[in-house]
Amino acid sequence: MDHNHIPPTVRRTYGTDDLSTAPSFAGGFINFGDWQGIDLTAPTAEDRVRSQEQLYRRVLRAFEEPRERKRLAEVGCGRGLGAALALREFRFASVTGVDIHPDQIERARTVNALALATYPDRLAYTLGSADELPFPDASLDGLYSVEAAQHFRELTSFARESARVLRPGGRLVVTTFFAAPGPEIAERLKILLASFADGLDVPHTLDDFTTDLATSGFTSVSVTPIGPDVWPGLDRYLTDTVPTGHWTRNFLPAWRDGLLDYHLLTATR
């Protein structure tokens, strides 16, 4: 894949900067976490890892039994820990992690070398993008993405490509944060959050994405807001890990003010 296809901020953030090393994250995962059941009195790095694993489990539980027969792919797999967890804990037939950034694919293969050696025919990591998935038509039973879609430049092609690679009856599961509708929302998010200001995150709206899915042939689109399980826990952890006044602390007020929210979405091909 042409490296120039990668947006500059994405190239830098997941290349030389290696976002997984930022204080906001821990253990190699790169998501805001599902903090259900975690004591927020004084959350530790181990709690942070647990929150990120729990977000993956929440997504993966959306795939119905029998999971052992399902061939899955993760779009925006990063360092690949979630794909390895999916195979290890949920016993899918196969899981392929896809990422647009070659540095992330290299890291995924290194970090998960033991898992790759243990499951050589069931776990893989490969280059690909949301608008150009590296799979034949109707070749997958499931497709999922964990906190990556906010980086995609547009979601129409992602919906279309998801429909193409999923077999009839296959399931798409996406979790990430979406912007509220309204012409002023994007500008307010740029003021509050550096990731929107520099173009790393794109203020996609949930309604636009569900429309794209319906247009692409998906049915039974279901959306669950999970902000209460994400934002307060994340902010409590950031209290002890980033400087006072750091821009990441603005995610919580942005949610409280209705500018964005975190959602879990499922759809059937």
Image (spheres, helix red, strand yellow):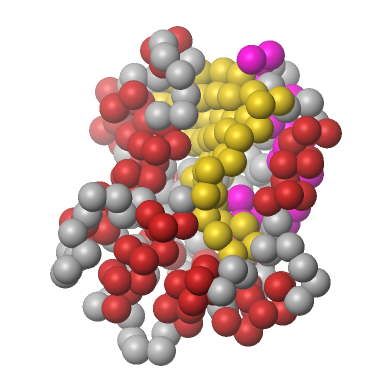
Q: Is residue 3 visible?
A: no
Q: Is residue 220 visible?
A: yes
Where does residue 9 sit, x and y in percent of width and height?
Answer: 62, 69
- In the rendered image, the vertical position of residue 243 relative to residue 47, given as above or below: below
Where does residue 155 sit, x and y in percent of width and height?
Answer: 73, 47
Residue at the outermost bottom position: 245
Residue at (68%, 51%) from the top-left corner? 206
Q: In which quadrant of the rendered view does residue 189 lie?
A: bottom right
Does residue 7 belong to the magenta stretch? no
Residue at (61%, 70%) from the top-left corner? 259
Residue at the outermost right position: 215
Q: Quadrant of the C terminus?
A: top right
Comparing 140 with 42, the one in front is 42
Q: Taking 29 as reference, is 201 left or right?
A: right
Q: Taking 131 as reference, is 77 left or right?
A: left
Q: In which quadrant of the rendered view does residue 220 lie?
A: top right
Comparing 194 with 98, the one in front is 194
Residue at (44%, 37%) from the top-left corner? 59
Residue at (31%, 45%) from the top-left corner? 53
Where does residue 152 sit, x and y in percent of width and height?
Answer: 67, 53
Q: In which quarter of the image is the N terminus?
A: top right
Q: What is the magenta range?
A: 148-169
Does residue 158 belong to the magenta stretch? yes
- In the rendered image, the vertical position of residue 66 relative to residue 243, given as above or below: above
Where does residue 47 sit, x and y in percent of width and height?
Answer: 21, 57
- In the rendered image, the vertical position of residue 132 relative to residue 154, given as above or below: above
